[in-house]
Amino acid sequence: MTVESRRLEIELEADGGMEDLTEKVERFVESSEVEEGAVTVYMLGSTGSVTTLEYEPGLQKDLPEAMEKLAPSGKDYKHHETWNDGNGRSHIRASIIGPEVTMPIINGELVHGTWQQVVAINWDTKNREREIVLQLRGK
Amino acid sequence: MTVESRRLEIELEADGGMEDLTEKVERFVESSEVEEGAVTVYMLGSTGSVTTLEYEPGLQKDLPEAMEKLAPSGKDYKHHETWNDGNGRSHIRASIIGPEVTMPIINGELVHGTWQQVVAINWDTKNREREIVLQLRGK
Amino acid sequence: MTVESRRLEIELEADGGMEDLTEKVERFVESSEVEEGAVTVYMLGSTGSVTTLEYEPGLQKDLPEAMEKLAPSGKDYKHHETWNDGNGRSHIRASIIGPEVTMPIINGELVHGTWQQVVAINWDTKNREREIVLQLRGK
């Protein structure tokens, strides 16, 4: 079994700032010996998410707008009584979408649809440097 | 380590059409040599999801209805300015629920609750042939 | 390859009762031989979820409140016609957040942010004893 992990640091804007990680993940898969296995793309922290998305400018606005309806910015969250940091909405959005996605590798290639990219999203109320772990497991 | 991958193609109806994949996954697990490990059930494309659900006719309507509230059909998404394909809601629903679930295998058996099935969901606005990858990793 | 699985049973309150599993997962990782790999934290059943969350009292109320808006308690779900058990909302919340999270292990340590805990959530309308599987895969 081969396990390889790589840490990335990326700058993301506040309230739904995104980066398409697909190319970085593909280069990592190509550079490794793993031909059959999986890669987990995982965000550290409790105000960010990883998921797959068609990465185009329209959806980069549409997804945060939908999450704004589910966990609105103006609301007085109980989280604010604990820390007074005003980012209750960010935590809720992050926990619903989740911190990771695990994608298959077959014949040395990352499996995804043509318009399906793997993206990191910052839900925090401030621009943030976010830490991502890419982990390959296979043979 | 054993890694085995299988591709499935399934026909799903528009706007929340579902198929229960549990039996197919269980047959794949039984046919393989893996006794201890995990299976990732993964949907290709950016307008579909995989999750677990009690697969019964009521919830097959209730879940799409809840997602309709979160990302309504009538809305004018910015995604439509990019492609004019009218399926902005489908992308949002797919990205929130996510494209995959990873389930443990113990003693050669898929671990799930009695009323917990693994289901593929098509959120697109048209009936679609969807491609699924089942991937077993273990020993 | 090493695969180790452990079953936990935990008591959770109704409608969003939570437990922070981080310490239990960390102790499992420390007790095992796996230095590089991943752990899947998986809830059996169709009315519960596993995700990461900053585990503090405010968010323990805020997250269920947001899910109440998405799948409200008062609603007459079609699920109730099938079973008459009144927990349609619980199934919807569970399927959207999902039953599992897969987290990397690097240098024998579980990777997570300082304020990022892995939590089990019971969405059912009754207090429940819930079954969790922790599964380590690595080397």
Image: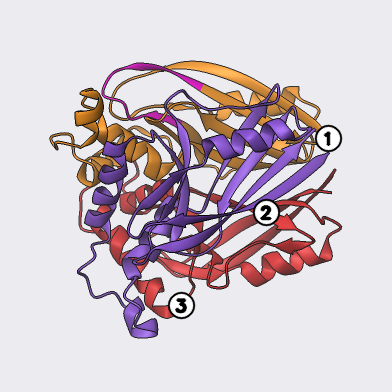
Chain colours: A orange, B red, C purple
Label 3 neighbour load within 10 Å: few <14, some 14-19, many 20+: some
Q: Disc 1 residue type? A: Met
Q: Is residue C18 left or right of residue A117?
A: left
Which label sits in the foreground, 2 or 1?
2
The N terminus of chain C sits in image quarter:
top right
Is the same chain shared between marks 2 and 1? no
Q: Is residue B98 left or right of residue B41?
A: left
Q: Is there any visible trace of residue A138 in the rendered image?
A: yes
Q: Disc 2 residue type? A: Pro
Q: Secondary structure at mark 1?
A: loop
> In the figure, residue C102 lies in which quadrant?
top right
Residue B71: percent from the left, percent from the top? 27, 53
Rendered residue at 49%/26% (across/down): A44
Q: Which mark is residue B56?
A: 3
Chain holding disc 2? B
Residue where numbered disc 1 is placed: A1
Is the same chain shared between marks 2 and 3? yes
Q: Is residue C74 left or right of residue A45?
A: left
Residue where numbered disc 2 is placed: B104
Of residues C97 and B106, which is closer to you in this image?
A: B106
Q: Is there any visible trace of residue B15 in the rendered image?
A: no
Residue interval drawn in magenta: A120-131
